[in-house]
Image (spheres, rainbow, N blue to C red):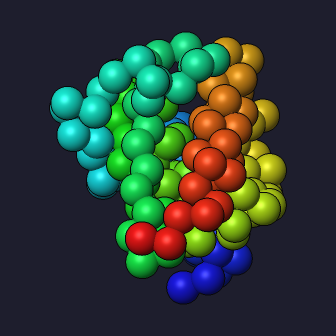
């Protein structure tokens, strides 16, 4: 599935819900499905700065594709990082670095978050893209 197809799939899923309470519940459920970061990798260098709660992100390049793992100590935040990972996992570092994550705006996510959570979302996207840029030359 392409990056664009993954975004369209999320957009379609969010269209199934009538209100934002249902969408929040869905985001929380998505957080239960993310590939969890190993406990020993929950270190300061993997902590995403700018988030209201603690969010850890790790990435590995396998066969030229980025594989992300993450965790968060707040259920909604865990769901948000889960959404991002769902779209960007198993993509090349170049694709991740250049990705236009239009699904965020299309589903109205940022505008339905508190200002601090919206800032955290931007921090998550920036950290993922920076991780991708740092791995552009990886050919593991």
Q: Residue drawn 45% across and 24% down?
A: 45
Q: Nearer the viewer, residue 36 or 112?
A: 36
Q: Nearer the viewer, residue 47 or 107?
A: 47
Please state the horizontal and vertical placement of residue 106, each as a whole percent of the image. Answer: 79, 57
Q: Nearer the viewer, residue 109 or 92?
A: 92
User: Does residue 96 appear left or right of residue 43 in this picture?
Assistant: right
* In the depicted structure, whether residue 65 falls above or below residue 111: below
Please state the horizontal and vertical placement of residue 48, each as a whole percent of the image. Answer: 53, 26
User: Does residue 31 appear left or right of residue 123 in this picture?
Assistant: left
Q: Residue drawn 49% across and 55% down?
A: 85
Please state the horizontal and vertical placement of residue 131, each as a whole percent of the image. Answer: 59, 46
* In the depicted structure, whether residue 133 falls above or below residue 99: above
Looking at the image, which residue sits at the far bottom? 1
Q: Nearer the viewer, residue 96 or 63?
A: 63
Q: Residue drawn 54% across and 85% down?
A: 1
* Residue 15: quarter of image: bottom right
* In the depicted structure, whether residue 113 falls above or below residue 44: below
Q: Is residue 29 visible?
A: no
Q: How many marks?
A: 0
Q: Residue drawn 34% across and 22% down?
A: 43
Looking at the image, which residue sits at the far left? 39
């Amino acid at each position: 599935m392409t990056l664009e197809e993954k975004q369209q799939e999320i957009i379609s899923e969010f269209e199934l819900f009538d209100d934002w309470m249902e969408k929040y519940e869905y985001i929380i459920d998505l957080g239960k499905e993310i590939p969890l970061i190993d406990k020993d990798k929950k270190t300061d260098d993997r902590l995403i700065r700018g988030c209201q709660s603690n969010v850890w992100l790790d990435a590995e390049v396998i066969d030229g594709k980025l594989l992300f793992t993450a965790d968060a100590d707040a259920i909604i935040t865990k769901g948000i990082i889960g959404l991002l990972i769902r779209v960007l996992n198993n993509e090349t570092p170049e694709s991740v670095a250049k990705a236009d994550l239009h699904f965020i705006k299309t589903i109205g996510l940022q505008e339905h978050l508190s200002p601090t959570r919206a800032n955290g979302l931007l921090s998550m996207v920036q950290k993922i893209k920076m991780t991708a840029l740092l791995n552009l030359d990886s050919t593991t």
